[in-house]
């Protein structure tokens, strides 16, 4: 069966859903190689607006640190994370989004032949940010990715409380929307409580956004070397002293938050979604797509594995679609969220507490291993006993915490709907 991997994203025709995210993987010099490798498009790397971007010039590249689990990243599901530490001494922090530099970066990026999405960080000076977006449009940007959730640049994004101040966010999006014509995508961060993700997406939609990207990188420390006491992410400061600090964390370690954010946005607004956060293989991309994303952005994995990773992702997606009988991407985007309403529990939390179900042991699967006893004893009401080699649940004691189901190695315990049962609130 022939399958169609192409995506129409805000009117931009993409040959498949895999984009390079705003990271060193999408730096200007890498884009011709990315085009040759087969990526569908790229989001410009924001740091290049803040320094000299001539090919071969000495603009700063972040040092990337990976915790000890790197040797396991070929095993799925991988839970590794990148942490990046920028050498900020060469960055122009007083004028980070100069229009002339943005135009130069975008024009150089367009020479690769790839569709180009231009990432512009959100500054408190809304007029300044709007001029930066206009510069991107003049240079030929296919989409503007307005980034009010930038986690690392002082004086921008989350440092200004965009993820808490809906009024400021709406004013920024409204200004850019009123003064540009290219599609406008707003990049959100999952580092907020779930209801705020929904509110934030709704505010952006009301202000005129054409699409939502989620999630941005997050502040964090990926670990400490317990033998030396040094943090895994360090840099040398202007005095030559090695330091550690809270920096930005990316990679599959943040994917659970990204998946939740995509589901929440999909349930809150009727806009296309571009997923970011720990897309390391085609399987993790499909997870995002089933929850509502129609494109996925890849950064850390492209750095870890190389730009040729996209070929494996495209082949894997194509084989998955053939196996499942999907003819196009549209056939399964959002299918999980539609069927299971993943993102709606926070709009009606009482519903999740009042369902008439019971934790039920499937006797033909249970081997009597007793793995379910410890969590029930510690976190439950000691409702489970193993009798004649089979787990038995006392429904009068069971508080439906689901821990027994989560730890059962045989999948022998499930939450089964009880038709006609009395609902206990």
Image: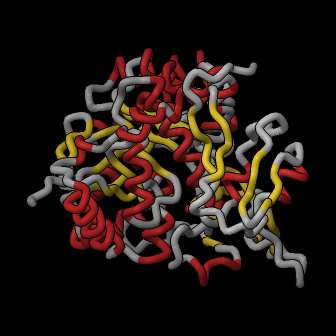
For the C terminus, the image quarter is: top right
Which residue is rendered at x = 15% and y = 50% of the image?
327
Measured from the top left, where is residue 256 in percent x and y?
A: 59, 51
Measured from the top left, where is residue 87 in percent x and y?
A: 64, 65
For the N terminus, the image quarter is: bottom left
Q: Quadrant of residue 16?
A: bottom left
Q: Quadrant of residue 424?
A: top right
Q: Is residue 308 visible?
A: yes
Which residue is rendered at x = 30% and y = 39% of the image?
143
Which residue is rendered at x = 44% and y = 15% of the image?
206
Measured from the top left, where is residue 69 in percent x and y?
A: 66, 77
Please say which color scheme the image uses.
Answer: secondary structure
Which residue is rendered at x = 55% and y = 76% of the image?
73
Q: How many marks?
A: 0
Check the image and name the residue furthest to the left.
2
Q: Nearer the viewer, residue 205 or 50?
A: 205
Check the image and name the residue furthest to the front.
388
In the displayed structure image, the side of residue 223 where residue 110 appears, left or right? left
Measured from the top left, where is residue 171 in percent x and y?
A: 52, 17
Q: Nearer the viewer, residue 213 or 327?
A: 327
In the displayed structure image, the side of residue 149 where residue 42 appears, left or right? left
Q: Is residue 140 visible?
A: no
């Amino acid at each position: 069966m022939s399958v169609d991997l192409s995506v129409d994203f805000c009117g931009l025709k993409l040959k498949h859903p895999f984009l390079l995210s705003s990271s060193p993987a999408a730096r200007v010099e890498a884009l011709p190689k990315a085009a040759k490798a087969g990526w569908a498009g790229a989001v410009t790397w924001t740091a290049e607006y803040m320094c000299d971007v001539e090919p071969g010039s000495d603009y700063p590249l972040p040092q990337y640190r990976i915790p000890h689990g790197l040797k396991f990243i070929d095993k799925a599901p991988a839970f590794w994370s990148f942490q990046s530490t920028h050498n900020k001494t060469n960055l122009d922090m007083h004028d980070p989004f100069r229009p002339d530099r943005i135009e130069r970066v975008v024009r150089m990026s367009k020479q690769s032949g790839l569709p180009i999405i231009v990432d512009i960080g959100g500054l408190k000076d809304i007029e300044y940010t709007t001029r930066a977006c206009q510069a991107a449009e003049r240079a030929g940007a296919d989409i503007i990715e307005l980034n009010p959730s930038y986690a690392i640049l002082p004086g921008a994004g989350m440092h200004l409380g965009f993820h808490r101040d809906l009024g400021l966010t709406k004013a920024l999006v409204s200004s850019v929307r009123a003064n540009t014509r290219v599609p406008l995508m707003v990049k959100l961060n999952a580092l907020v409580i779930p209801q705020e993700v929904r509110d934030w997406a709704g505010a952006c939609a009301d202000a005129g956004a054409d699409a939502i990207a989620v999630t941005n990188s997050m502040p964090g420390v990926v670990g400490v070397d317990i033998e030396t006491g040094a943090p895994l992410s360090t840099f040398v400061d202007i005095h030559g002293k090695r330091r550690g600090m809270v920096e930005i964390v990316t990679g599959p370690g943040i994917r659970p938050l990204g998946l939740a954010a995509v589901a929440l946005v999909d349930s809150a607004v009727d806009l296309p979604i571009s997923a970011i956060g720990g897309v390391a293989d085609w399987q993790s991309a499909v997870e995002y797509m089933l929850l509502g994303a129609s494109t996925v952005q890849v950064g850390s994995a492209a750095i870890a594995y190389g730009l040729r990773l996209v070929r494996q992702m495209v082949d894997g997606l194509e084989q998955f679609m053939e196996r499942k009988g999907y003819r196009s991407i549209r056939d399964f985007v959002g299918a999980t969220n539609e069927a299971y309403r993943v993102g709606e529990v926070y709009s009606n939390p009482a519903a999740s507490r009042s369902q008439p179900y019971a934790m039920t042991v499937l006797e033909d699967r249970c081997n009597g291993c007793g793995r379910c006893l410890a969590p029930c004893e510690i976190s439950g009401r000691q409702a489970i006993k193993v009798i004649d080699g089979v787990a038995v649940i006392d429904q009068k004691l069971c508080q439906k915490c689901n821990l027994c189901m989560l730890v059962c190695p045989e999948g022998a315990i499930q939450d089964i709907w009880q038709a006609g049962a009395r609902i206990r609130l």
